[in-house]
Image (cartoon, helix red, strand yellow):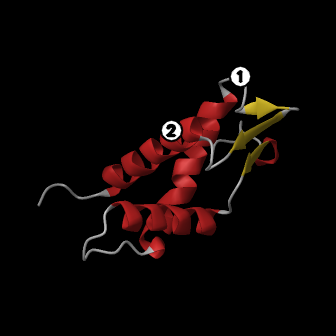
Amino acid sequence: MSKIINKEIFTTSLAEEDLALYISSQLNYLFPDKYQIDHNVLKPYVGKALERLRWCFVHLRIKGFYSNGQYKYSHLNTDQHAIFLYFLCNTILMKMDLST
């Protein structure tokens, strides 16, 4: 994480592990096939995606993202969650070996 960004001014509605569990539940519900996503697969990427989201939020002053000196991410805010999901998917994609 960048030293410029103070973690104390950025809060999340769910802890990282709970967020990974929430997203895996969403994926398993939306895509009810034989391939179940285990939240442990997502856990290594959630922190990096939150770091990227934090950096983005710190450079914005949008109502609902910032109030009382604190940047807030809520998984229930669809705008914020869509941004987070983009960062999560992009983070996973960047870590994948696509040479095969």
Q: What residue do we see at 53% from left, 58% from top? A: 46
- The residue pinned by badge 2 equals 83
Q: How far across and down, in percent of the image, does residue 84 sit?
A: 52, 44
Where disc 2 sits, the SS reads helix
Q: Nearer the viewer, residue 30 or 42?
A: 30
Give the crowd class for mark 2: few <14, some 14-19, many >=20 residues within 10 Å. some
Label placed on residue 61: 1
Where disc 1 sits, the SS reads loop
| Image-based side of 88 in relation to 97, left or right | right
| Image-based side of 68 in relation to 84, left or right | right
Residue lying farthest to the left in this orientation: 100
Q: What residue do we see at 57% from left, 57% from top? A: 47
Q: What residue do we see at 73% from left, 41% from top? A: 72
In the image, is residue 82 above or below residue 37? above
Q: How far across and down, in percent of the image, does residue 2 sit?
A: 64, 42
In the image, is residue 94 above or below residue 36? above
Q: What residue do we see at 62% from left, 63% from top? A: 16
Q: Quadrant of the C terminus?
A: bottom left
Give the CA distance from mark 2 to mark 1.
Answer: 15 Å
Q: How far across and down, in percent of the image, does residue 28 sit?
A: 38, 68
Q: Which corner quadrant of the image does residue 56 belong to? A: top right
Label placed on residue 88: none
| Image-based side of 83 in relation to 95, left or right | right
Q: Which corner quadrant of the image does residue 53 belong to? A: top right
In the image, is residue 13 above or below residue 15? above
Q: Which corner quadrant of the image does residue 64 belong to? A: top right
Q: Are marks 2 and 1 in contact (CB under 8 Å)?
A: no
Q: How far across and down, in percent of the image, does residue 10 sit?
A: 75, 44
Residue lying farthest to the right in this orientation: 68
Q: Amino acid at mark 2?
A: Ile
Q: Amino acid at mark 1?
A: Arg
Tally of marks: 2
